[in-house]
Image (tube, rainbow, N blue to C red):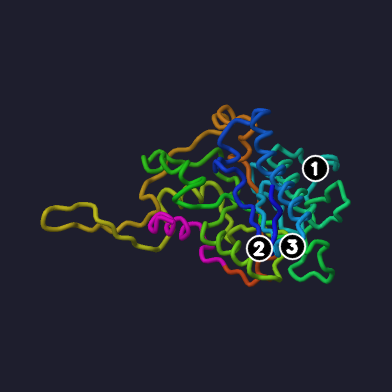
């Protein structure tokens, strides 16, 4: 790998060149190794290149995931922010980390090794994060920003393109109980923060890049299917003749109902070890984004979903 130089920003934002999601394929041992290589190994190579460069980049923005936090099938009174200590498997009464949590921790350890002395051979814990304004300068000349990303909503790719077909057919519905919390972010907000992180020299450390509105799976399903709680009237042509077209007002994201639900046992049978990614969630918030001056253009799930599909974003 050629050395990173000329003080250009470096961003490691797409974990896999194919664009495959962590949930797309069964977690065989081979698949787990592919996920580790695409995230941990590649990050280690980038960090080594940055450290070896005589002119390291001024900023390194790296994507992690909110999967680093423990999840539960039902909402509880636990909130996770950037300053929350992340439990480890050797702690008493700590939840046993699943593969996704282990992957994220090793991924962030690889990022955080950037701020270790060059002679270091081990990485530090990923549970700590710097303040927006640090009194002590970082060890590295490269400013490090880690973006813990939830599912990014876009009508052109990612999660929504995988799940929208059943909804378009009127067959969409909640997963399991529908009470599992669903952190999310609109693609425009995600892109805007990454741009801010590159340009703003005061932004460093780890950030939970999650939308302010907390949604559960049932609320997400309603927003995707019909947007019934969105007070916004949209107009589209539904009939066209040689002389005229008739416009019918609708209020929707995909303009489809959602009457169905998928039982938990079916998801467990179909997804196996990956099932908690669909059946469990966590209350994740950010206590650091406000200090950067960042504001969300799409903080609410119903408005965000309608914007995505009416503007083909």
Per the image, the residue denoted by label 3 is 55
Residues shaded magenta:
296-313
How far is the residue under mark 3 from the one under mark 1?
Answer: 43 Å
Q: Where in the figure is residue 240, as x and y percent of width and height?
A: 17, 53
Which element carries disc 3, helix, strand or loop?
Answer: loop
Which element carries disc 1, helix, strand or loop?
Answer: loop
Mark 2 vs mark 1: in front: 2
Per the image, the residue denoted by label 2 is 8
| Magenta segment, prevailing SS (helix, strand or loop) | helix
Residue depicted at x 36% and y 40%: 169
How far is the residue under mark 2 from the one under mark 3?
Answer: 9 Å
**For residue 174, side relative to residue 86 (left or right):** left
Residue 94 disc label: 1
| 49 inside magenta stretch | no
Q: Where in the figure is residue 163, as x and y percent of width and height?
A: 47, 42
Which quarter of the figure is the C terminus placed in?
Answer: bottom left
């Amino acid at each position: 790998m050629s050395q990173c130089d000329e003080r250009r920003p470096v961003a490691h934002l797409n974990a896999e060149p194919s664009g495959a999601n962590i949930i797309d394929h069964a977690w065989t041992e081979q698949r787990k190794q592919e996920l580790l290589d695409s995230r941990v190994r590649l990050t280690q190579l980038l960090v080594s290149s940055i450290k070896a460069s005589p002119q390291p980049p001024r900023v390194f923005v790296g994507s992690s995931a909110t999967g680093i936090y423990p999840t539960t099938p039902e909402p509880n009174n636990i909130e996770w922010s950037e300053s929350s200590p992340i439990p480890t498997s050797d702690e008493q009464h700590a939840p046993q980390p699943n593969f996704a949590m282990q992957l994220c921790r090793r991924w962030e350890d690889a990022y955080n090794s950037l701020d270790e002395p060059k002679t270091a051979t081990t990485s530090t814990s990923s549970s700590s994060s710097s303040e927006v304004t640090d009194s002590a300068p970082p060890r590295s000349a490269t400013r490090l920003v880690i973006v813990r990303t939830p599912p990014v909503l876009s009508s052109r790719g990612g999660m929504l393109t995988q799940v929208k077909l059943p909804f378009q057919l009127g067959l969409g519905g909640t997963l399991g109980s529908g009470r599992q919390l669903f952190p999310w972010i609109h693609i425009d907000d995600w892109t805007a923060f990454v741009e801010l992180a590159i340009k703003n020299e005061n932004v460093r450390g780890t950030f939970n890049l999650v939308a302010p509105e907390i949604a559960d799976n049932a609320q997400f399903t309603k927003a995707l299917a019909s947007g019934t709680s969105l007070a916004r009237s949209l107009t589209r042509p539904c009939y066209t003749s040689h002389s005229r077209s008739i416009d019918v007002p609708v209020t929707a994201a995909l303009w489809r109902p959602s009457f169905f639900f998928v039982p938990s046992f079916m998801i467990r049978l179909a997804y196996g070890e990956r099932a908690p990614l669909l059946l469990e969630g966590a209350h994740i918030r950010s206590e650091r984004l406000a200090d950067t001056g960042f504001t969300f253009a799409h903080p609410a799930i119903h408005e965000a979903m309608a914007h995505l599909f009416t503007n083909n974003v």
